[in-house]
Structures are given as structure tokens and as C-alpha cells.
């Protein structure tokens, strides 16, 4: 009677070990791909193209595509939004560091670029898998969904851009900023300090 419950735990141990090994390998490849932003986005564009070709070829799954579009719009808003919303902040001006370890950062995203990319990639993979199950192929008139999504996108982006203008933040940085400050007098006279 003692060994009756131990058989299922012993059988599940190799499965758990295999799952842990698989997730460790997957995390390793995710970690390796982190600095390669351009290649990650190219891979996601390839996945999106394969999904679009699948939907075009099957001539269905428009409701899945609409749900995917709404989810991508939600991710885009998170990517363009600051971590701390100035509308909800009670401070009159910019926040100063309160500790010695704090650092001034002009714009911190609510959704970082890597998580944005990873979520979009997972969404396209999930939507692609859903196109193989006929239960998700709900018959709808797709031009209405497309029109509604375009209107929703335009209104949401207008509100987001107005928020960016009102609080004077730009969610993109284009490399290191260069300032054309004064040149030192030592460099203009040709003398070198030693």
C-alpha cells in the first residue's frame, strides 16, 4: 500500500526534467537573440508574412486576424507609452532622483522593445496555429472588421500622439545625441595639454 502513489510521481519526473531542459534551451536562444534586434524583427516579419499568406490562401479566419490586430494595437500602445504616466503623476515637475542609486532616464517604456517583439512573435505563432482549427473560422464580413480596426487604430493613435505632444516626450531615440558646444581654446590654438 505504501508504493501506490509513488508510481505516478516517478513517471512524471522524466517529463518534468525534459520540460525544464527544453525551457532552459529556449531561454538560452532567447538570451542569445537579445542584442540582434534587426534579425529578430526580420524573423517576425517572415512569420507575419507566412500568417498573411495562410489567411489569404484559406480565405478565412478573419476573426482571428481581427483579434490579432486588436492585440497588436494594445502592444503598440504599451510600447509607445511611458512607464509613469504624467497625467497620473502628482508632481509639478520632473522627478529628481531620491537615492544615490537612482539615475535620470528621459523615457522608460511601459513595454520594453524585447517584450514587445516577443509578444508580437508569440501572437503571430498562436494565430497561425489557430488557422488549422476550423472552430476559429467564424464566417464574418471582413470589410466591416477591417474598417472598424482602421477607425480604432486612427482614434487610438490620435489620442496617443496628442498625449505625447502634451507631455513633450518622444518614445524613439535615434542614436546618441550630439551637441555642438563650445570648442576648447587649447584645441583651437594647436597646443596640447600635457
Image (cartoon, rainbow, N blue to C red):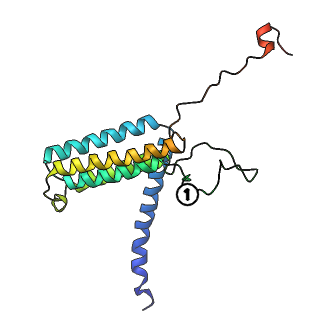
Q: Position of residue 16 (x, y in %)?
A: 43, 67
Q: Position of residue 111 (x, y in %)?
A: 48, 50
Q: Is residue 119 visible?
A: yes
Residue found at x 37% / y 49%: 156
Q: Position of residue 108 (x, y in %)?
A: 56, 46
Q: Is residue 56 left or right of residue 71?
A: left
Residue found at x 48% / y 55%: 24
Q: Quick check: 179 above or below 14? A: above
Q: Which residue is mark 1?
A: 88
Assign a secondary structure to mark 1: loop
Name the residue furthest right.
Answer: 194
Which quarter of the figure is the N terminus placed in? Answer: bottom left
Q: Quick check: 15 above or below 33? A: below
Which quarter of the figure is the C terminus placed in? Answer: top right
Q: Report the front residue among 144 and 73.
A: 144
Q: Is residue 122 left or right of residue 104?
A: left
Q: Report the front residue among 192 and 104.
A: 104
Q: Is residue 170 left or right of residue 60?
A: right
Amino acid at each position: 500500500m505504501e508504493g501506490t502513489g509513488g508510481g505516478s510521481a516517478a513517471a512524471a519526473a522524466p517529463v518534468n526534467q525534459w520540460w525544464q531542459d527544453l525551457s532552459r534551451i529556449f531561454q538560452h536562444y532567447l538570451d542569445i537573440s537579445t542584442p540582434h534586434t534587426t534579425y529578430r524583427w526580420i524573423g517576425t516579419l517572415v512569420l507575419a508574412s507566412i500568417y498573411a499568406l495562410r489567411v489569404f490562401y484559406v480565405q478565412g479566419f478573419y476573426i482571428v486576424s481581427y483579434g490579432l490586430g486588436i492585440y497588436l494595437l494594445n502592444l503598440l500602445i504599451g510600447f509607445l507609452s511611458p512607464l509613469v504616466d504624467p497625467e497620473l503623476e502628482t508632481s509639478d515637475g520632473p522627478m529628481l532622483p531620491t537615492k544615490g542609486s537612482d539615475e535620470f532616464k528621459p523615457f522608460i517604456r511601459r513595454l520594453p522593445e524585447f517584450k514587445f517583439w516577443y509578444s508580437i512573435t508569440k501572437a503571430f505563432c498562436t494565430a497561425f496555429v489557430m488557422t488549422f482549427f476550423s472552430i476559429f473560422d467564424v464566417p464574418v464580413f471582413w470589410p466591416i472588421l477591417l474598417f472598424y480596426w482602421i477607425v480604432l487604430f486612427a482614434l487610438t493613435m490620435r489620442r496617443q500622439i496628442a498625449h505625447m505632444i502634451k507631455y513633450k516626450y518622444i518614445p524613439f531615440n535615434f542614436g546618441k545625441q550630439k551637441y555642438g558646444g563650445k570648442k576648447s581654446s587649447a584645441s583651437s590654438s594647436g597646443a596640447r595639454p600635457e
